[in-house]
Image (tube, rainbow, N blue to C red):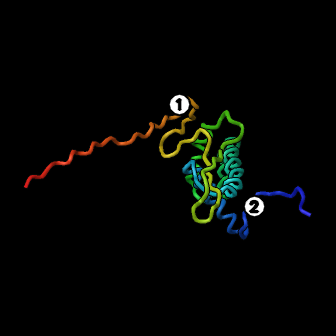
Amino acid sequence: MRHRNSSNRLGRKPDQARHLLKNLATSILLYESVRTTKKRAQVVQGIVDQIITIGKKDRLDLAIRKIAPMITDSNASRKVIEVYKKRYATRPSGFTRIVPVGMRKGDGALLVDITLVDGVAGGEALPELKKEEKAKVPKKTKPTTKKAAPTKVSA
């Protein structure tokens, strides 16, 4: 029986899953927002949170040594230490957010955006919108075009 035996795993060979998670974690750390499937986001969320926690709490040399095997690009570890350490200095945990987007057209997989909380996406800060501040969509009006009166043709 497999009662109460749950884990976040990907249905791939172990080395493929490991490389997929490394690449996904690196992309999230570099670009701060990635669109992927729900299951992949759930699996990589803990890894990204762990990397940021290591960058915050450990000494510089130890943090680099612990983060390097978890990612594929040295710029990502540099960004963790230089940018995220300051940004999340007061936040104890919960550095990522998973936002549902919809379903993928081809196979119907559930897509989500996994983003860093208080992050910057596309060069601008992500604003927290309140209900009152949401943009109101103008009502569509029918175009008013007057038909020209028929002209009499005299022969």
- The residue furthest right is 1
> As rendered, which of 152 and 103 lies closer to the eye?
152
Q: Which residue is mark 2?
A: 9
Residue depicted at 69% across the width and 63% down the height:
18
Do the residues bearing badges 1 and 2 touch, measured as CB atoms within 8 Å? no
Image coordinates for residue 154, horizontal then vertical, percent: 9, 52
Q: Is residue 29 above or below residue 135?
A: below
Q: Say whether disc 1 or disc 2 marks the residue closer to the N-terminus.
A: 2
Image coordinates for residue 35, horizontal then vertical, percent: 58, 54
Number of numbered discs visible in the structure rendering: 2
Q: Quadrant of the C terminus?
A: bottom left
Residue depicted at 12% across the width and 52% down the height:
153
Left of 12 or right of it: where is 80?
left
Image coordinates for residue 123, horizontal then vertical, percent: 47, 43
Is the residue marked by circle 2 packed among few (<14), some (14-19), or many (20+) residues within 10 Å?
Answer: few
Is the residue marked by circle 1 packed among few (<14), some (14-19), or many (20+) residues within 10 Å?
Answer: few
Left of 110 or right of it: where is 149?
left
Left of 118 or right of it: where is 135?
left
Q: Amino acid at mark 1?
A: Glu
Q: Quadrant of the N terminus?
A: bottom right
> As rendered, which of 83 and 125 lies closer to the eye?
125
Q: Amino acid at mark 2?
A: Arg
Residue 95 visible in the displayed image: yes
Q: Mark 1 or mark 2: which is in front?
A: 1
Image coordinates for residue 55, horizontal then vertical, percent: 66, 45
Q: Which mark is residue 133?
A: 1
Mark 1 lies on a secondary structure that is loop
Mark 2 lies on a secondary structure that is loop
Residue depicted at 49% across the width and 34% down the height:
136
